[in-house]
Each structure stands twice: as structure tokens, then as C-alpha cells.
Amino acid sequence: MTEKSFVEEIEKCIASGEVSLPVFSPTALKVQQELVKAEPDLKVLEKLITGDQSLSSQILRIANSAFYRGLVEVLTVKAAIIRLGMQEVGRIALLAASKNQFHSKDPVMNELIKQLWQHSAGCAIATHWLAKRCKFGEILSQAFFAGLLHDVGKLFVLTVIERLKNNLNMMMTHALLLEALDTLHTQQGYALMQQWSMPEQYCRIARDHHAPNFDHKDQLLVMVRLADMMCHKLGIGLTKDPELNLATTIEASILELSEISLAELEVMLEDTSSLLN
Ligand SMILES: [Fe+2]
Ligand SMILES: [Fe+2]
């Protein structure tokens, strides 16, 4: 089977409407909506999180992980909010919710899903770091979410491939699978996020984060593109390309990032590896 016919099979399956992705965690979305407010309410945040048992336990686990660990173990959501701050707990909630979203019974698929999640989480952390470094105060609270969801189309296409793979009379090589994900994920991610009624700026990022022509004034998009390339450079995700030179990219020049800033981003991302496992 050629790549073209494989991609066509996937598109046909999507068009038939047989496969759907579970919606993004409603609790995490409400958390995100609270955090973009000018004055987020600690009580509302605590109530949202404690109302979701699995989210609460994961937040406590991450808050006590090597990456965040303080001197004393945090035992309640409120203690985590007080120790780490509302915005940080909000970001942990988004990470935990996105990790929960996809599973497969097939160990090979599960490994791919895990790598995709690591990539999304790495991009979320890197985009947020960039927004802080570039002092984009007004979009800081959107940066993490934008990075986290930029490749959601890949998860969707992977779900479709899993559904198809028993029916297809073919050898599905790893290369063929990666090519199909690359070809389809921006367009399918955009459609999916629109279906989820996500704010338009996140939908556009899902669509344009690899496009050769893109809006240079869309700071969120430019940051996600750079974060994405940094994750590829470091091998956070499905591919690794250590030769990538980010200093010469148009994104780095739009954001006016020095080589030193890029090196700092690289070190920071490598330090988060304990969080991404
Ligand atoms: Fe992508
Ligand atoms: Fe990506």
C-alpha cells in the first residue's frame, strides 16, 4: 500500500464519522477559563479540581514529583495551590487532563501516544517559557494551552489508524504511519478543535504551525512554532533532529531571541524530563 492510498483510507474513515475523539476534559477547560480571567478565584479553582477525583490525585502526584518537590509533601489541592500558585496548578491540571485523554490496548500504539503526549507537554512548557521570556504578559495564560493542543490532530489521526489497522490489508510500517500523521494532522486538528468549539486562536495554531506562509504578527503561533522545533531538536516526541539550528529561523528573529536565550530554553526543557515520564 502506498502512502497516498493509506492517507485516503484514513480520510474516508474520518469522513464517515465513525471515529470520534473524547472531548478535552471539561474540568481542565473550566480551569483554563478561570485562569485567563484578570483575577482568577482561588476558591473556584480549588472547587473545580477537588470535584474531579482523578485530576486531584494526579495534581498531587505531579506537585510532589522531582520537578516540583519542595521540602514538605503537599497533601491537599489547596496546599498545592498555595505552594505553587494558581497559574502553576492550572498548568499541572491541563497536563494531567491531557495525559488522561488517550489510551490504547495495543502496546505499540500506547508507546506512540506516550511520545505524542511528551511532545505536547514539552511544547506547552516551552511556549509558556517563551511567553515569559518575551514578556508577552497578555497572552501568557494562553501560551501553555496553545502549545499543549497544537498537535491534537496527530492523536486523532492515530486513533483512526488504530481503528483501521485490522481491516487494512497492508504492512503498516513505522515510516508510513509517521508520514500519514504528518500529512493529515494540521487539517484534521483544525477541524477537530472547531468541532470542540475551542477559541479560534487555538484552532488556527493547530492549522498553521507548520505552514510555510503564516501570520508573523500572531505571537502565540510564532512561539508554538519555535517550541515545536525545539522539541524536535531535542527528540521530545516522535522525531529527533539535533542538527536543527533554531537561531537562524524566522521565528527566532520575529521573537528577537538570542542564541543564549535559545540555549537556556534547551536546558530548561531538558530539566523537565522527569515531569514528562
Ligand atoms: Fe505538528
Ligand atoms: Fe508538534
Image: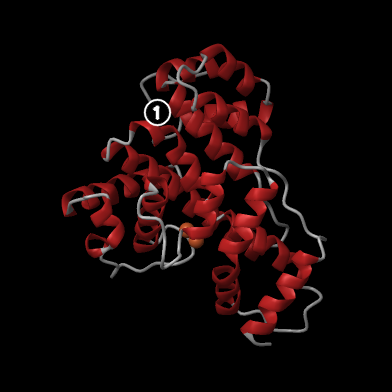
Q: Is residue 223 left or right of residue 180?
A: left
- For badge 1, the amino acid type reads Arg
Q: Nearer the viewer, residue 218 or 78?
A: 218
**Residue name at image x 70 percent, y 62 percent:** 106
Could you say which quadrant of the image residue 179 lies in?
bottom right
User: How dense is the environment of label 1, judged by Cα within 10 Å: few (below 14), some, or many (20 and up)?
Assistant: some
**Residue name at image x 34 percent, y 31 percent:** 137
**Residue name at image x 57 percent, y 72 percent:** 183
Q: Nearer the viewer, residue 66 or 155?
A: 155
Q: Is residue 76 visible?
A: no
- Asked if residue 225 is positioned above or below residue 37 in the image, the reply reads below
- Asked if residue 2 is positioned above or below residue 104 in the image, the reply reads below
Q: Quadrant of the N terminus?
A: bottom right
Tally the numbered discs: 1
The residue at label 1 has a CB less than 8 Å from ligand 2: no
- Asked if residue 222 is positioned above or below residue 16 in the image, the reply reads above
Q: Which residue lies under the disc numbered 1?
A: 69
Residue found farthest to the top: 43
Q: Percent position (x, y) of residue 25?
A: 66, 37
Q: Is residue 188 visible?
A: yes
Q: Nearer the viewer, residue 206 or 157?
A: 206
